[in-house]
């Protein structure tokens, strides 16, 4: 399955240089810890992060949770509860533009996890917060771990 991208890179930068981007963060908690993926993208490269992505126009939040879990982790999840929201001031430093706002949901996996996602990002379960992690994710992971 190819990851959906509603905009070209140029459209993405133009749009999200002017307005915030709404994202959904999927915190998958297992018996042994929390699932993180290692970024291979230009922004936050080689940092662990909570799986997440843009909510599309006219997409229900519940559908976005499932799409992102499938795209980032190749699994379906059961949503447990809303943990809160995250804002990303570091996005300007990382990308040169942007200020995403993420709705963070605690979820459980409905199947075993693969070792990497479709974009080749490594998937791992942590029972601690790694040093090389997206800065904004530390706060929410402190609540969960």
Image: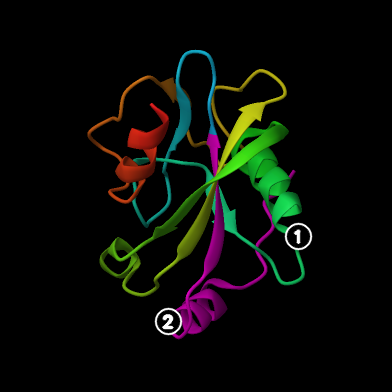
Give the residue drawn at x 30%, y 40%: 133
- From mark 2 to mark 1, how far is it between C-alphas? 24 Å
In the rendered view of the protein, which quadrant contains the N terminus? top right
Q: Indicate left or right for 58 with 54 as reference.
A: right
| Residue 46 visible in the picture | no
- Residue 60 tag number: 1
Q: Is residue 142 left or right of residue 3?
A: left
Q: Secondary structure at mark 1?
A: loop
Residue 133 located within the stretch drawn in magenta: no
Q: Nearer the viewer, residue 92 or 105?
A: 105
* Residue 60 point in image, percent of width and height: 75, 60
Residue at x-position 43% and y-position 51%: 41
Residue 17 is tagged as 2
Q: Which mark is residue 44?
A: none
Considering only vertical position in the picture, is 15 above or below 3?
below
Q: Nearer the viewer, mark 2 or mark 1?
A: 1
Tell which residue pokes out farthest to the top in this image: 32
Q: State the extent of the magenta-drawn residues as a range.
A: 1-27
Does residue 130 appear to the left or right of 70 in the view shown? left
Crowd class of label 1 (few under 14; some 14 to 19; many from 20; radius 10 Å): few
Front residue of this view, candidates 114 and 119: 114
- Disc nearer the start of the sequence (2/1): 2
Question: Is residue 16 inside the magenta stretch?
Answer: yes
Residue 74 in percent (x, y) is at 67, 33
The quadrant of the rendering that contains the C terminus is top left
Q: Residue at x 69, y 33 (%)?
A: 77
**Rendered position, 8 above or below 131:** below
């Amino acid at each position: 399955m190819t990851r959906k991208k509603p905009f070209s890179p140029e459209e993405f930068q133009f749009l999200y240089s002017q307005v915030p981007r709404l994202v959904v963060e999927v915190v998958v908690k297992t018996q042994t810890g929390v699932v993180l993926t290692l970024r291979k993208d230009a922004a936050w490269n080689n940092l662990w992060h909570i799986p997440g992505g843009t909510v599309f126009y006219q997409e229900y939040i519940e559908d976005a949770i499932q799409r992102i879990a499938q795209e980032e982790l190749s699994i379906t999840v059961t949503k447990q509860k809303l943990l809160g929201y995250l804002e990303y001031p570091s996005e300007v430093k990382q990308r040169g533009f942007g200020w995403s706002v993420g709705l963070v949901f605690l979820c459980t996996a409905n199947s075993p996890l693969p070792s990497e996602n479709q974009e080749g990002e490594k998937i791992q379960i942590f029972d601690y917060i790694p040093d090389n992690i997206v800065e904004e994710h530390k706060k929410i992971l402190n609540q969960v771990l």
